[in-house]
Image (cartoon, rainbow, N blue to C red):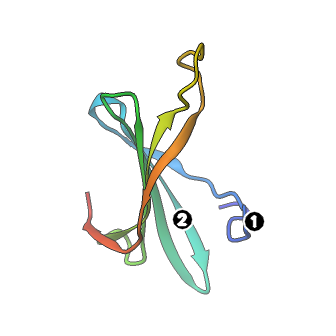
Amino acid sequence: MTSTALAPGGVKEKRLIARYPRGAVRFQGEIAANGYVILDRTTPTPLADGRVRQTIERSDNGGATWTVGFHATYVRVASGGRDASTPLERQETHGQGAQRGQT
């Protein structure tokens, strides 16, 4: 974790922990705060139609259970003449609090 991870706009380090079929990957890091260690993982998943789904989860019990804190689907900006390197924009987000078991 970098020294600014808990600051607004701060940066924390995550490491690649898994690769899945069809291009999905998972990154995981830790946040240490007030004597607790919180695991934080991000899973971007390419979808068949070219969109990318991103889920960010956290665990405060060593990974026994995970809570979704952010879920979004990104789509390419629709504009004539842009190629496949066009940046993605967030299309939709979903609320917090969904519990998931360890995967």
Foreground of the two, 7 or 30:
7
Residue visible at 42% across and 77% down in the picture: 60
- Mark 2: which secondary structure? strand
Query: Where's residue 99, x and y in %?
Result: 29, 72
Q: Pick the quarter of the image with the C terminus.
A: bottom left
Under mark 2, the amino acid is: Glu
Residue visible at 27% across and 32% down in the picture: 21
- Mark 1: which secondary structure? loop
Query: Where's residue 70, x and y in %?
Result: 46, 61
Query: Neighbour class for label 1 at 10 Å: few (<14), some, many (≥20)?
Result: few
Is 91 left or right of 77, judged from the image as shown? Answer: left
Residue visible at 41% across and 34% down in the picture: 51
Foreground of the two, 12 or 85:
85
Query: Where's residue 13, x and y in %?
Result: 61, 54
Is 39 left or right of 85, judged from the image as shown? Answer: left
Under mark 1, the amino acid is: Ser
